[in-house]
Amino acid sequence: MGADHRAVWGRFFDDVSRTKGDTEAANSYISVRNFRLLRAEVLELLGDLRGARVLDAGCGTGHFSLPLSAANAVVGVDVSAEMLAFARAKGLAPVRAAAEALPFAGGVFDVVLAASVLQLIPDGAAFVRELLRVVKPGGRVVICTINAGNAALGFLRVLERKKYRHFRIYPFREIAALVRAAGGTVRSYRFLYYPFGGAAAVPGGEEPGPVPRIFGTTVVVDAVKEA
Ligand SMILES: C[S@@+](CC[C@H](N)C(=O)[O-])C[C@H]1O[C@@H](n2cnc3c(N)ncnc32)[C@H](O)[C@@H]1O
């Protein structure tokens, strides 16, 4: 997509929110069911964060920020003004900014979440570096994206070339390498199974088996910044 991808995605998601409003569909990349499975899995994985400072990078209309804000101080960032308007209407206070150039000092968040954004970013290294920069040493960075190895999605990406043409698909090994290069370690992966539900949890140091690699639709990377 080139250097103007942030403006392009900003306009794209402005249009999405105008047509779909503040719906789960406006925030999801496969389907609403996949979105719900992912949100439930991520919220469970994050566990009880009570009192944490959380960054929701690419927050959309705030479907992750809102439940997290019940017990934490949550800041969202997004490039789409229209998506952010919906988030503000829920009482959230997000900032319009690009996740690859965050307007925050280093080490100020306990947890950074980036749900369904990485596939929209051509420069994944800059994105992951920024997420790791703003989290405290010992803090967590959770990144969710399309599982590159999924056979059905690979097929769909060929069939629906137009829809997926601007997506950049990052294999889990590449995400782990980007995390390492930015000073973090992957603690675990979760491979989510859509439409059936459930997930395979794989320790960061282990090689996922063929079932999660081929049938997992979304991969959730749970990383920690080295102290
Ligand atoms: C599929 S939606 C996911 C929204 C939210 N994370 C969720 O899961 O409900 C992707 C969001 O990423 C935002 N986005 C795209 N590129 C971005 C960038 N470079 N920096 C920040 N946000 C970005 C889009 O505007 C959109 O709101």
Image (spheres, rainbow, N blue to C red):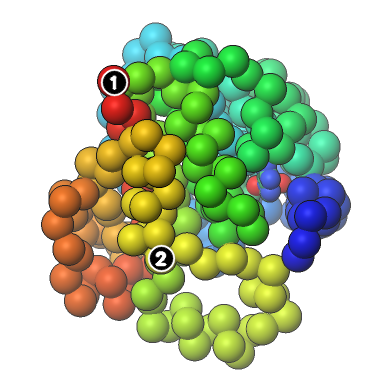
Cβ at disc 1 under 8 Å from ligand 1: no
In the displayed structure, would residue 178 be above or below residue 218? above
| Residue 193 coordinates in the image, percent (x, y) | 32, 66
Secondary structure under the numbered disc 2 in the rendered image: loop
Q: Amino acid at mark 1?
A: Ala
Total numbered labels placed on residues in the image: 2
Residue 210 appears at what percent x and percent y? 20, 76
Task: Quadrant for residue 101, please give it.
Answer: top right
Query: Residue at 62% of width from left, 53% of height from top?
Result: 123
Q: Position of residue 56 (x, y in %)?
A: 55, 32
Q: Is residue 223 above or below residue 151?
A: above
Q: Which residue has dot 1 on it? A: 227
Q: Is residue 210 above or below residue 226?
A: below
Q: Residue at x 43, y 38 (%)?
A: 182
Q: Quadrant of the C terminus?
A: top left
Using the rendered image of the protein, determine whether residue 39 is visible from the camera's viewpoint.
Answer: no
* Residue 66 left/right relative to 98: left
Disc sitting over residue 171 in the figure: 2
Q: Position of residue 82 (x, y in %)?
A: 82, 40
Quadrant including the N terminus: bottom right
